[in-house]
Amino acid sequence: MRVTYNENHRKIICSGIDAIRAAFAEGDTGAILSLLLCLDFYLDPYYGHKLPYENEVFDLLQETAVKSSDNDVTEDCLNLLSSYSYPPFTVLEKNIDSIKADNTKQMIRDFLCEQDWDCNFTELQNIIDELHKEFGSSFGWTMIPLLQSDGHYVRELKKELGEENELSKEMIFAAARNEASGDVLYFLPGTVWRIYHLTCSDNNSDSFPLYREFPDIGTLRDFFRENL
């Protein structure tokens, strides 16, 4: 379906958050997609617009992503949030467990994990750089490049865990590796860190591959310092 917008859509956007909310509530999927495309124009800083109710728009996009039964609408809402807003996405986080449609819930879980990863990548890079400067070659961890963080090491972990494991369908990121030990650090949904010892074998038993979990990056930093 080709999506366009016209002067009427512009008038709705410029009329304020109440007009946008009403149009979302009353419109069919096509009308909502047109409004979302029009919002893209008004949110993009390139065009010089600054909506005084921008934060309310971001909340409405989160609400719409949660409530919509149309994948295209949910995807467009998430794309706008990714392009023009920043975490935390409180509305998504508070309501994700109430979403009944599995595909919508998974889209939002993946989105939240990706946003969290973007925020945590730089912090982890700073920690690893700091430890390299302090301990030199004694510190064996190196960052996995950002563009490779969803590549080989993620596929290898999911292969070893097997299709029945809860992580097999989740968006996860490979963050760093230790060549000497064969361990790989992963970032998981819920801002959880795990170090897995990969076995290079398929469909391991429930207890393998072995891992150690860290609830936050501060705990992970302490582990790095204590286990050189």
Image: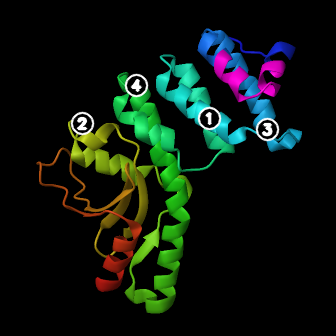
Q: Earlier in the sequence, mark 2 or mark 1?
A: 1
Q: Earlier in the sequence, mark 4 or mark 1?
A: 1
Q: Earlier in the sequence, mark 3 or mark 4?
A: 3
* Above or below for 19 versus 195: above
Q: Residues within 10 Å of mark 1 (few under 14, many from 20)?
A: some
Q: Residue at x 47, y 54 (%)?
A: 149
Q: Amino acid at mark 4?
A: Asn
Q: Earlier in the sequence, mark 3 or mark 1?
A: 3
Q: Amino acid at mark 3?
A: Leu
Q: Closer to the camera, 108 or 51?
A: 51
- What's the magenta region? 10-22
Q: Amino acid at mark 2?
A: Glu
Cα separation between marks 4 and 1? 16 Å
Please give the label number shown on residue 79.
1
x, y (%) of residue 151? 45, 49
Cα separation between marks 2 and 1? 28 Å
- Residue sitting farthest toward the front: 18
Residue at the spot of label 3: 51
Residue at the spot of label 4: 103
